[in-house]
Image (tube, rainbow, N blue to C red):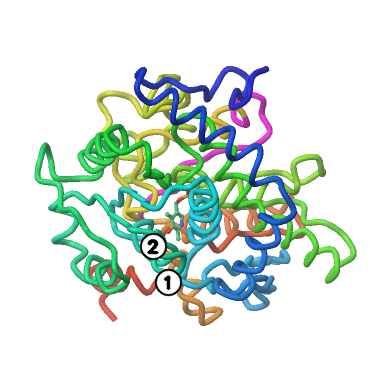
Amino acid sequence: MSEGDFDGYGGRHVPEPLREPLEQLATAYDEVATTDEFQTEFRDLLAEFAGRPTPLYRASNLSDRYGADIYLKREDLLHGGAHKLNNCLGQALLAKRAGRDRLIAETGAGQHGTATAMVGALLGLDTEIYMGKKDAERQAMNVFRMRLMGAEVNEVTRGNEGLADAVDAALEDFARNVENTHYLVGSVVGPDPFPRMVRDFQSVIGEEAREQFRERTGGLPDAAVACVGGGSNAIGLFHAFRDDPVDFYGAEGGGKGAGSTKHAAPLSKGKDDVIHGMKTRVIDDDVEVHSVSAGLDYPGVGPEHAMFRAIGRCEYTGVTDEEALAAFRELSETEGIVPALESSHAVARAIRLAEDGEHDAILVNLSGRGDKDMETAASKFDL
Ligand SMILES: *Cc1c(COP(=O)(O)O)cnc(C)c1O
């Protein structure tokens, strides 16, 4: 089994000019990121800049209501308001050590672009963010925030002026500037080494949660639940529990629900295909990528999840927009915690599991906070 192969998923399905830079990145990752020096610097920044460890919180009101112990891993309390910073810090440190002085990234709603702008400012790296013009108009405050931190935001005007066009523009930039540029990929997707590298940087979530859970209860949860867009917060939570008797549940963007051709659920409803440099699960051609949460709006998914699905290690289900919005409101009301709409998919899945009554202790990754979703929520709820 070669590196980056997840039981036939993954790999490096890229055009010739990108092979050499990816090989270099993989070598840098294998040689540099494993050193004590790198790990110490990474852990120090996670603690002092990002605010780790994040708390493990027993949601007592929600637990009482559903008769199961529901624990939240509070990635919403990380600097920037989501788990994305873990990965951005790791990759930016690696880029710097590999002699790159420039970061590029694409962003849809602006969350990954913002996290990239943060680490660019922190480590003094030139940072350029590609964003579809339409997305940039919709997310004007995020564009401003990225510029405030010194990033250049490039509004892409080709095609549909959306995320896919931003990816194309970023890839072209990367191919032109491989000598000094690192392409900071935002999830466990793309060609090797990204899926395993991003997983390793995000694994701190599950390592902490496992330790915190054991300290607190003396045991392990029965189930671990996370939302799945590209799949990085989910893999980050699951990895530490891989060899434990803990059931994994992934909540995908189920969109409008049964029978609809608008969703973002390649694992529960898609097919095997190659996309963005990897073999994985991809949504069907006649389906329009849609979820109420921008962070889940992706037609593919990380290859390790495709493998988990194939071997039955994790159960993946589409959670509809409506169910996610209900969970968003319920967690806000019962616990005083406003989750990101992405994370609300995981909360909804956890509530259903608690109702089913087969698990006593359920660990949920609260991947981010909901401040960014206020406008969407305000348009849905008449309060
Ligand atoms: C970006 C994002 C996601 C989706 O990305 P994954 O790689 O699947 O984790 C989920 N939750 C939040 C809060 C996000 O910002």
Quarter of the C terminus within the rendering: bottom left
Tell me where residue 212 sits by quadrant: bottom right
**Disc 1: CA contacts within 10 A as few (<14), some (14-19) or many (>=20):** some
Q: Position of residue 14 (x, y in %)?
A: 39, 22
In this picture, is 313 found above or below 341?
Answer: above
Amino acid carrying label 2: it is Leu
Q: For the image shown, how many numbered marks are present on the structure?
A: 2
- The answer to whether 337 is drawn above or below residue 279 in the figure is below
Relative image position of residue 167 (x, y in whole percent): 28, 39
Vertical arrangement, residue 195 with respect to residue 293, above or below: above
Above or below for 14 versus 365: above
Q: At numbered mark 2, what does the secondary structure look like: helix, strand or loop? A: helix
- The amino acid type of the residue labelled 1 equals Arg
Within the magenta stretch, is there residue 106? no
The residue beneath circle 2 is: 325
* Location of residue 340 (image quadrant): bottom left
Q: Which residues are magenta?
A: 308-321
Side (left or right) of 215 relative to 262? right
- Marks 2/1 in contact by CB < 8 Å: the verdict is yes
Residue found at x 60% / y 23%: 5
What's the residue at 55%, 59% (across, down)? 86
Give the residue at mark 1.
329
Say which quadrant the N terminus sits in: top right
Question: Can you give x and y, in whole percent of width and height, for residue 113 in the image?
Answer: 34, 58
